């Protein structure tokens, strides 16, 4: 409860008003003026005894509390105080009567006769005899219900706003997770299909044929191997089969490794978003080339399927201390966008160049495509949430990529000579996060 207190000064001489204080013979004396003032004041004024019983209150006081004229005489401060403010009210009155404070001013709740709550600002002080002995306490009441109602409304709206922005934040986090997970799920699907295809066409089944043949010739195995043309070819056939199976095994292992890396990236995307509230990504020191290669691998299936030629132009091999998965999210988005842009162009010669170069700010990764290009008039909206020109697009990729780049202390820029003339997206990253990062 807000309350201000003053330290007691010398006793005020409220009752000792000399008659000489009259302004003119026609005007009333100061005492009469005081009386009229208190009666007519638009504030509630109440005098109370040590035990809090009201001795005299003005009309405004009665009106404020819904009391009939004079009814206050049967009431005490406690009778009219809201239960929630009992203890603080008793405490302050006691301090006042015992001279520990000279006055106080606070906001408190009263209860009107009809049970309604009334917020008031009370300024209270002691009324004393000229020698300083206390006579009664006096309180000035200002109705602040409407201000208080407004304050409560502002508080409620503020809480609602905080909740709304929390929900919006959660929705953004969820969209981000879905978007990034969706990107990688495509690659997972491609790897899983390739692995299934390999297994379906595996030459492993032929081993069963060889075993069956050998079983048939259990009793004349030596003769079969030495004279039968199939037996004679068997060692050579088995050697060739072993080479093929080894090849298949290596391919399957590679697909499984890709699957695991993609799965890790999905896991990290989710974990990263969960950690988003705390904003503490895990920093790793990793070669920029390795990061770019990881992101290319995540898109490899899509690039091959759509016959997009990929050219690597690595001019720098710096190491970055970064939140690796944030960088991967950006690069995966850029490469997928480049692939779409190439696809939409309808060219036969679809090409994406990925360039790494050193710049004064750190390292720059450029994804350059010869796709549909970007019209100058949409350039300024490219990074806005929801801007998309693709039928199945969400307009989320570049928006989240630009935010992530800023969180990494870097930047993301787009360039294009115009429609049909390809596009270049440049991600510039510091070699290590600045100490003054405010993310
Ligand atoms: N390499 C590019 N070449 C031409 N236009 C591009 C390129 N990359 C992005 N754009 C334009 O920017 C828009 C926004 O890209 P963004 O990645 O934010 O969303 P999207 O790809 O449309 O959908 P999604 O949210 O699924 O990624 C695209 O719809 C496209 O018009
Ligand atoms: Mg996109």
Image (cartoon, grey):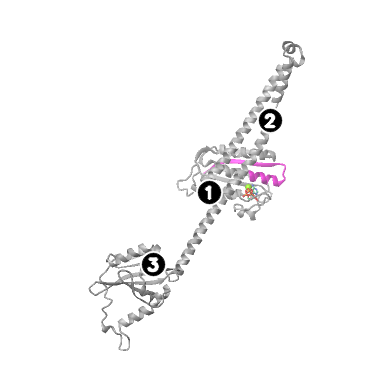
Q: Quadrant of the N terminus?
A: bottom left
* Residue 96 figure quarter: bottom left
Q: Circle 2: is it few (<14), some (14-19), or many (20+) Cα within 10 Å? A: some
- Asked if disc 2 is less than 8 Å from ligand 1, the answer is no
Task: Write down the residue under mark 1.
Answer: 406
Q: Circle 3: is it few (<14), some (14-19), or many (20+) Cα within 10 Å? A: some
Secondary structure, mark 3, is loop
Q: Residue at x 32, y 66 (%)?
A: 93
Q: Nearer the viewer, residue 205 or 120?
A: 120
> On the picture, is 145 further left or further right than 48?
right
Q: CA distance from mark 3 to mark 2?
A: 83 Å
Which residue is most to the bottom?
Answer: 26
Residue 196 percent location from the top left of the image: 68, 33
**Is 345 within the magenta?**
yes
Residue 322 percent location from the top left of the image: 51, 42
Look at the numbered discs 1 and 3 and tell me whether their residues touch, using CB distance below 8 Å: no
Q: Is residue 37 above or below residue 424?
A: below
Residue 302 percent location from the top left of the image: 66, 40
Instruction: Name the mark on residue 199.
Output: 2
Q: Residue at x 72, y 45 (%)?
A: 346
Q: Residue at x 63, y 53 (%)?
A: 387
Look at the numbered discs 3 and 2 and tell me whether their residues touch, using CB distance below 8 Å: no
**Region in magenta:** 335-359
> On the picture, is 163 further left or further right than 22?
right
Task: Write down the residue under mark 3.
Answer: 81
Q: Is residue 18 above or below residue 144?
A: below
Secondary structure, mark 1, is helix
Q: Nearer the viewer, residue 292 or 132?
A: 132
Q: CA distance from mark 1 to mark 3?
A: 56 Å
Instruction: Name the mark on residue 46.
Output: none
């Amino acid at each position: 409860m807000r309350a201000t207190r003053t330290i007691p000064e010398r006793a005020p001489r409220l009752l000792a008003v000399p008659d000489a204080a009259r302004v003119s013979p026609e005007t009333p004396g100061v005492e009469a003026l005081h009386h009229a003032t208190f009666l007519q004041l638009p504030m509630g004024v109440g005098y109370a005894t040590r035990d809090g019983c009201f001795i005299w209150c003005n009309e405004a006081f009665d009106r404020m509390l819904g009391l009939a004229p004079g009814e206050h005489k049967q009431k005490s401060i406690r009778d009219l105080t809201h239960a929630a403010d009992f203890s603080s009210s008793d405490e302050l009155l006691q301090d006042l009567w015992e001279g520990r404070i000279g006055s106080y001013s606070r906001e408190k709740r009263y209860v009107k006769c009809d049970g309604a709550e009334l917020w008031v600002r009370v300024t209270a002080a002691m009324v004393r005899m000229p020698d300083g002995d206390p006579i009664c306490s006096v309180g000035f009441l200002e109705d602040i219900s409407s201000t208080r109602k407004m304050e409560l409304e502002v508080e409620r709206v503020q809480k609602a706003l905080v909740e709304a922005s929390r929900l919006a934040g959660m929705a953004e986090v969820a969209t981000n997770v879905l978007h990034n997970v969706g990107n990688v799920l495509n690659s997972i699907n491609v790897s899983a299909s390739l692995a299934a295809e390999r297994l379906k066409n595996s030459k492993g089944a032929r081993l069963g044929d060889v075993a069956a043949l050998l079983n048939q010739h259990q009793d004349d195995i030596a003769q079969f191997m030495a004279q039968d043309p199939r037996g004679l070819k068997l060692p050579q056939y088995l050697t060739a089969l072993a080479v093929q199976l080894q090849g298949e095994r290596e391919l399957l292992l590679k697909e499984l490794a890709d699957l695991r890396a993609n799965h890790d990236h999905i896991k990290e995307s989710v974990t990263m978003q969960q950690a988003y509230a705390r904003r503490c990504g895990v920093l790793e020191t990793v070669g920029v080339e390795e990061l770019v290669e990881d992101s290319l691998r995540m898109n490899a299936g899509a690039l091959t399927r759509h016959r997009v030629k990929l050219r690597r132009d690595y001019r720098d091999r710096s190491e970055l201390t970064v939140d690796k998965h944030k960088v991967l999210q950006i690069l995966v988005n850029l490469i997928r966008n480049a692939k779409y842009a190439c696809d939409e162009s309808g060219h036969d010669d679809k090409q994406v160049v990925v360039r790494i170069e050193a710049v004064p700010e750190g390292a720059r990764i450029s994804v350059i495509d010869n796709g549909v290009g970007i019209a100058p008039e949409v350039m300024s909206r490219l990074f806005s949430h929801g801007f998309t020109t693709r039928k199945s697009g969400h307009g989320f990729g570049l928006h989240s990529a630009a935010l992530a780049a800023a969180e990494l202390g870097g930047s993301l820029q787009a360039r294009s000579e115009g429609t049909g003339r390809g596009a270049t997206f440049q991600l510039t990253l510091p070699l290590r996060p600045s100490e003054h990062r405010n993310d």
